[in-house]
């Protein structure tokens, strides 16, 4: 199984255009793609204030609260309260979306896929389990709290570290905390 380690300490922070926070890209495809041409993109964001989300036409999003008191997202006029951490919430990136913080800054985990080019399944692991990369897919493990490791690779991940696995084969994911397990597939 091919494993690429992506350490949190090596990710630069990029300020949002509206000044409401910063984002750190964990991984994306194709390599070097920008916001206009990615197939998929995974990031962590520090949200310091509420406000409108940037529109991403043709993109599906999954957002997961990691830290903080939570947020209320109003998506196309319907409010969704994300007050409990580690519960993925999916919505269309082209929907009119506004964020209201529920009492202070938050950290969220974001997965975006371009419709017709990629799909993503986001699962949360808080126990030891087997992980397997489906043929033609990639698996991204992001340690959200505590630590995580892979048995065969003898790999340890700390908070916000990630591992990208892109060749088929099973491995044992050891979790002491919470880890996001993101399965990324080409569409079609």
Image (tube, helix red, strand yellow):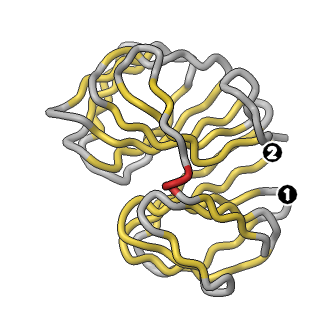
Secondary structure under badge 1? Answer: loop
- Dot 2 or dot 1: first in sequence order is 1
Identified at 41% across, 45% down, the residue is 64
Identified at 26% across, 23% down, the residue is 100
Q: Considering the image in quadrants, where does the C terminus appear?
A: top right
How packed mark 2 is, by other alpha carbons closer than 10 Å (few <14, some 14-19, many 20 or more), is some
Q: Where is residue 28 in the image (x, y as percent from the top left)?
A: 69, 42
Q: Which of 167 and 119 is in front in this view?
A: 167
Q: Nearer the viewer, residue 188 or 1?
A: 1
Q: How many labels does the image show?
A: 2
Q: Do the residues labelled 2 and 1 touch (CB within 8 Å)?
A: yes
The residue that label 2 is drawn on is 186
Decide if residue 57 is on the left or right side of residue 95: right
The numbered mark at residue 136 is 1
Decide if residue 65 is on the left or right side of residue 139: left
Identified at 75% across, 42% down, the residue is 29
């Amino acid at each position: 199984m091919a494993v690429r380690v992506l350490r949190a300490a090596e990710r630069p922070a990029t300020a949002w255009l509206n000044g409401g926070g910063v984002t750190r890209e964990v991984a994306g495809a194709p390599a070097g793609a920008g916001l206009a041409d990615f197939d998929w993109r995974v990031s962590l964001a520090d949200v310091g204030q509420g406000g409108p989300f940037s529109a991403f036409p043709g993109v599906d999003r999954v957002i997961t609260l990691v830290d903080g008191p939570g947020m209320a997202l109003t998506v196309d006029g319907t409010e969704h309260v994300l007050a409990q951490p580690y519960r993925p919430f999916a919505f269309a990136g082209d929907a009119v979306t506004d964020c209201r913080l529920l009492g202070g800054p938050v950290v969220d985990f974001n997965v975006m896929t371009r419709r017709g080019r990629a799909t993503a399944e986001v699962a949360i692991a808080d126990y030891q389990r087997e992980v397997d990369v489906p043929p033609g897919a990639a698996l991204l493990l992001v340690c959200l709290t505590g630590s995580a490791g892979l048995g065969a690779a003898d790999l340890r991940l700390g908070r916000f570290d990630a591992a990208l696995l892109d060749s088929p084969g099973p491995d044992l994911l050891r979790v002491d905390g919470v880890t996001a397990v993101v399965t990324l597939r080409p569409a079609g």
